[in-house]
Image (cartoon, rainbow, N blue to C red):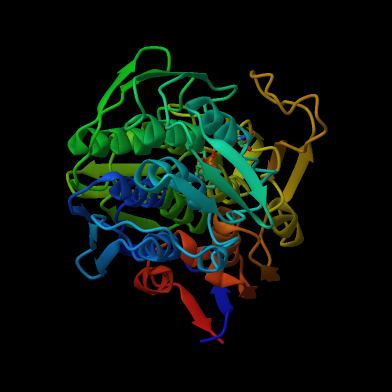
Amino acid sequence: MTDLLRVNGGTPLKGEITVRGAKNFVSKAMVAALLGETPSVLRNVPLIRDVDVVADLLRLHAVTVDYDDAAGVLEFDSANVETAHVRDIDAHAGSSRIPILFCGPLLHRLGEAFIPDLGGCHIGDRPIDYHLQILRQFGAVVNKQGMGIHITAPRGLHGTKVELPYPSVGATEQTLLTAVRAQGKTELKNAAIEPEIMDLIAVLQKMGSIISVDTDRVIRIEGVDRLAGYEHTSLPDRIEAASWGSAALSTGGDIYVRGASQPEMMTFLNTFRKVGGAFDIDDDGIRFYHPGGPLNSIVIETDVHPGFMTDWQQPLVVALTQAHGLSIVHETVYENRFGFTDALNGMGAQIQVYRECLGQLQCRFGQRNFYHSAVISGPTTLRAAEIEVPDLRGGFSHLIAALTAEGTSHVSGIELINRGYEHFMRKLAALGADVEMI
Ligand code: EPU
């Protein structure tokens, strides 16, 4: 199979698909298994590339990993963790951002960690300064080495007080995964409290940790000497569910997303309704559909939880090209997440990006020359085009645009979408999309 997709657009997506566990939780729960001295079981695991990458990294450290992808069950045994060869770890450079979260668990289990150059989507600089600062506060010594980082803890890891400059998801997870077995107490202020983080805390509690989440984004952790394995079922992927919801809206379709769950998606659902989308919720999932009639323009600001997720923004922008009037999206999480709009404009959308904060929040990017606000003027008729997938969520958006447009588009680099969307081609087929790999 090559990596070029022919898309005959203009047909509403209709049917049923299933979403399984959240990419941005499952990968972290896999790292947590490294801390357990007895076996762990994780359920509802999707077959996506990020899971493969983390499984490979665990295996390099002599963790036994068995994955039954049909059942969605991962089993780990971390009893005999070993130091991996730097050359083998380095082979994973650039493939994911998760390796940075191996630091704390590896320091606890082995006394050292080597972290390759990170990957992930190119949606901003995505520095790791918070991570390294936190690790140093716990007592780690960080040495940049060739393309990676070598980390040791000659005097062990000790609980500390951390205050994040911004409620970073990754830095919150770094603190949790390091603090649970550090000596003494850790206090984390200005923590991220995304549902995926709450699920990680649930896993760590099952393993034997003592963690409390207080008001005002403060998390307190009391270190313990030993952690056991866990059994856990992942929360569903609310980003994937919302992506299919936006695809239904944009193409004028009707998609039942089995597995989607309301509590983690409330902010998205409110916005979806304001734009003019309709949804029905039952115990097994959420049906997203275009009820007919014009869509409404809207003002959105992305934010940390419980705000509107940055990862929901890109697919919804495609639906906003079909709404009447001027919509405004102010991206406050990443400085550079509107690159995908160039291709949409090439297809006939009218999206103008601005350096100013076009919203109520004066965010940290306002004075720094980043094009982080977008004005979308609609409705516009989208035309078929030749498109190259730029990143995971941007790529999904391009695909929705191609499915919305009349005519035949060619989308290359589709493999990137497999990083975060399970059985992506199969789901398109189930929804009646006229697509073919060529
Ligand atoms: N930041 C720093 N320094 C750091 C860490 C973060 O400046 O050391 C900044 C980032 O540059 C960004 C902001 O803080 O501007 C927020 O980044 P965060 O650390 O919260 O993001 P992340 O942990 O790298 C996770 C998800 C992203 C999701 C964000 C926000 C994973 C693997 N990735 O990234 O998901 O957008 O949280 O919710 O969990 C995706 O799934 O497509 C994706 C990009």
**Residue at point 46% right, 23% down?**
191
Classify residue 333 by image quadrant.
top right
Q: Is residue 56 visible?
A: yes
Q: Residue at x 71, y 38 (%)?
A: 374
- In the rendered image, is residue 298 in sight? no
* 296 vs 133, nearest the viewer: 133
Q: Nearer the viewer, residue 1 or 382?
A: 1
Q: Percent position (x, y) of residue 377?
A: 70, 42
Give percent across and percent down for residue 368: 80, 29
**Ligand 1, image quadrant it occupies:** top right
Percent x, y of residue 94: 60, 60
In which quadrant of the rendered image does the C terminus lie? bottom right
Q: What residue is rendered at 39% in x and 72% in y?
A: 432
Q: Where in the figure is residue 160, as x and y percent of width and height?
A: 45, 19
**Does 137 sit above or below residue 90?**
above
Residue nearest the observer in this picture, 28 or 369: 28
Residue occupying the point 22% across, 39% down: 227
Q: Is residue 106 left or right of residue 302?
A: left
Going by the picture, which residue comes out furthest to the top? 215
Of 26 and 117, nearer the camera is 117
